[in-house]
Image: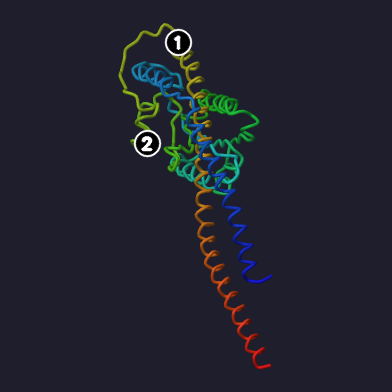
Amino acid sequence: MGKTARIKGDLDDIEAILEIISILKDVSTNRFFTFAQQKEDFAKFLELFLVFFSMLETVETNCPLVRNSNAGADIVVITSESSFMAQLNSKVCSAAVKEFEKNPGAQVICVGYRGADKLRSLGVQLSRVYENIEQMGRYQVALSVRDYLIERIMSGESGKAMCIYIWAKSFNILKPRVVKLLPAEELLAAPEEEEENASSSEAVPREKKKFLAESSIDGLMKVLADIWVSCRLYEMISDSLLAEAAAQAQQLESAIEGLSKDKKGLMLSFKKASRGDLNKAMREVFTSSRVCRRR
């Protein structure tokens, strides 16, 4: 096969691959905006919990879900089990390692087997791993994690619980985010990181209100904590769909840029090779005509 034919074959292959990747990128982009529209907004619903939690600041109670002095912490890390999510999982796992260093001896719970493998490679020991998220169901995963966290806090094995996941701030910006789950006093002690959370469910005016508790705070808090933690976890696990779609689109965009550069180089080589073939043919014709004249 001649050089020109080989380059033309490579050029045709790249054009076909570019067309396929462009279609996949459009699909991922559409998925992102579709998920964004379908995403259930828990903000107003969760604000009501925080209003109640703020009233508990003045209440005397021994309920560990409100406040406690237990040592230790539980860190839930939400990762993706989809393919080509290595960069996304690396971001959330790196953030988990930093948080683990702040809380030595913390128990790390990972959602997603790919993230679990990454955390183990970083030297983090996992107390529990939840795999096959799609088959198990995102809501069921949220309930299972919730039961585990609340049980540990109620038994005194842990003092607080937090969750780390990738937050899709926009289509192009994906950031690891740390969310405090329990105890209630921990949610009100300090706002969550950065001003970007001003529009989130945590950014609520902390008005101290007096109230009369007709029921036991312990029993009331147990019920509300179940709903609060399960809803919060379900929201974050569902938000991972947005991050996955955005990450896929970004990776495909990078692939398109790289292949486009290769295509330009091949087109230049193809033009040079075509000119070389044309010059060679012209030389052969000129040489043949001179030979014919001499005869």
Q: State the SS at label 2.
A: loop
Nearer the observer: mark 1 or 2; the answer is 2
> Residue at (31%, 23%) from the top-left corner?
205
Q: Which residue is mark 1?
A: 216
Against 102, is 188 above or below? above
Q: Quadrant of residue 207?
A: top left
Looking at the rendered structure, the kind of residue marked 2 is: Glu
Q: Which mark is residue 92?
A: none
Against 240, is 225 above or below? above
Q: Is residue 93 left or right of residue 203?
A: right
Q: Which residue is mark 2?
A: 193
Against 251, is 142 above or below? above
Q: Nearer the viewer, residue 202 or 160?
A: 202
Q: State the SS at label 1.
A: loop
> Residue at (50%, 54%) from the top-left corner?
257
Residue 167, how many percent across, how many down? 46, 37
Q: Nearer the viewer, residue 162 or 160?
A: 162
Q: In the rendered image, which quarter contains the C terminus?
A: bottom right
Q: Quadrant of residue 147?
A: top right
The answer to the question of whether label 1 and label 2 lie on touching residues, with beta carbons closer than 8 A, is no
> Residue at (58%, 74%) from the top-left corner?
278
Looking at the rendered structure, the kind of residue marked 1 is: Ser
* Nearer-N-terminus badge (1/2): 2
Q: Is residue 181 left or right of residue 79?
A: left
Q: Nearer the viewer, residue 162 or 232?
A: 232
Residue 226, how many percent across, how many down? 51, 20
